[in-house]
Image: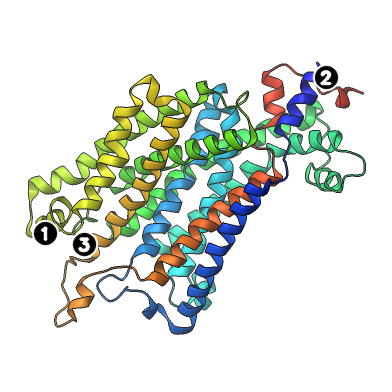
Amino acid sequence: MSTDFDQLVYDLAPRKFSWKGNLWVAILVVIILVGSYSYVQQVRQGLVITDMRDYALWGVYISNFVFFVAISLVGSLITAILRLSGIKWSTPLTRIAEIIAVAAIIMAGVTIIIDMGRPDRMLNLFMHGRLQSPIIWDVIVITTYLVISVLLLYYPLLPDFSILKRHAPESARVRKWYSGLSLNWVGNSEQRRIYSRSIKALSILIIPVAFAIHTVTAWLFETTYRPGWDSTNFGPYFIAGAFVAGAGAVVAVMYVLRKTYRLENYITDFHFNKMGKTLVLLCLIYLYFNINEYLIPTYKSTEEEAVHLQSLFTGQYATLFWTAIIGGLVLPVIILLFPQGRKPLPLFLVSIAVVVGAWWKRYIIVVPTLSHPFLPIQGVPESWRHYSPTWMEWSITFATLAAALLIITLLVRFLPIIPIHETSEERGLVDAAQTK
């Protein structure tokens, strides 16, 4: 039994990057540095370096923010909902979901700061914020969600750090880190009781907070009278879309990690099949809310809504709109209905399409509406009526996406990708080092 356990620890313990891993990190760092240069110019010159004006007062930054918020919901889907449901097959995926959630919510907060014309006034939101403002609601729930997500990532790591400490060589420097991070975990009955209750409490707590962060983000749009946003459907619409984006992100990351670290014995075809079926269900729910979101305004056909919908269905944004709907939702559902479509490689390609479609869907939610304001401004330059992100905006946006991937990459480097303690218990393996 001890041999099997030692093999499990060896398979799941963090490993140093190969040259491919180092190259990947270098590429991400370069993208971040280019974006940092653009952001320095933005701080020095102001938002004039962007194409945002009085019409398009929000742009690619807010689209990116909503995308990060959506991706972060995966922590509550995989970690909380499936854990509380007693579904054991999700165990190898829980830490991947937690890592993605933490990275996404960190970058969501950073993106909001980037969008501010005066980031030096960020502290004023906390010191002089007014609860009447939906922006304050967003700040509160994002901060709360980040704290809970970090705790939900860290608590299940306590027994894993203890295991890694016992199996690390005596002379290894990392042994001291594992010892400190394990918080003296020895696995006695009292520790297990507190551990179990804490994770259950966090899992229960994160669900309403996760729903709140997406609902409040939707309210930021709904509290305006702009065509395309004046909808009571936005809350569940955002939540359904977030589940789709988050599930797609988990599939993409689990495929890459499985190939990179040869985890075929732990992340199996069975897990891809299950996630494929889950993704089909989530896409169908999101398609239902999309039908609600666009069918009713089309039926009412008010003058303002008609102009907005025309730009989506047949006008300026039609290519993006139909590509996101068909390529990011309809085709994935059709492909994943077949068992062959739920094999690892096809599902990975579908998940990439879903995530990319999810990003552009947020862009479609934000930008077209701003091009058709409820009260048009008189006598503005023609260029203000159109929005096209500048290269600096794109470089900053790509930098935030690269930073999220870098956070995931570094956490994967130093943390066990798959929970060692939970996996060993499910497989009935005993740690001989602990029993001595």
Look at the image and tell me in which quarter the C terminus lies. top right
Q: Nearer the viewer, residue 331 or 107?
A: 331
Quarter of the image for residue 197 reads top right
Residue type marked 2: Ser
Mark 3 and mark 2 lie on one chain; the one further toward the N terminus is 2
On the image, numbered disc 2 is attached to which residue?
2
Mark yes or no: residue 231 visible.
no
Quarter of the image for residue 26 reads bottom right
Residue type marked 3: Arg
Q: Report the mark closest to the observer, 3 or 2.
A: 2
Q: Which mark is residue 226?
A: 3
Q: Nearer the viewer, residue 249 or 80?
A: 249
Q: Which mark is residue 307?
A: 1
Please rate how many residues cluster around mark 1, counting C-alpha atoms within 10 Å: few if below 14, some from 14 to 19, many from 20: some
In the image, 324: left or right of 375?
right
Whether pointer 1 and pointer 3 mark residues with C-beta atoms closer than 8 Å, the reply is no
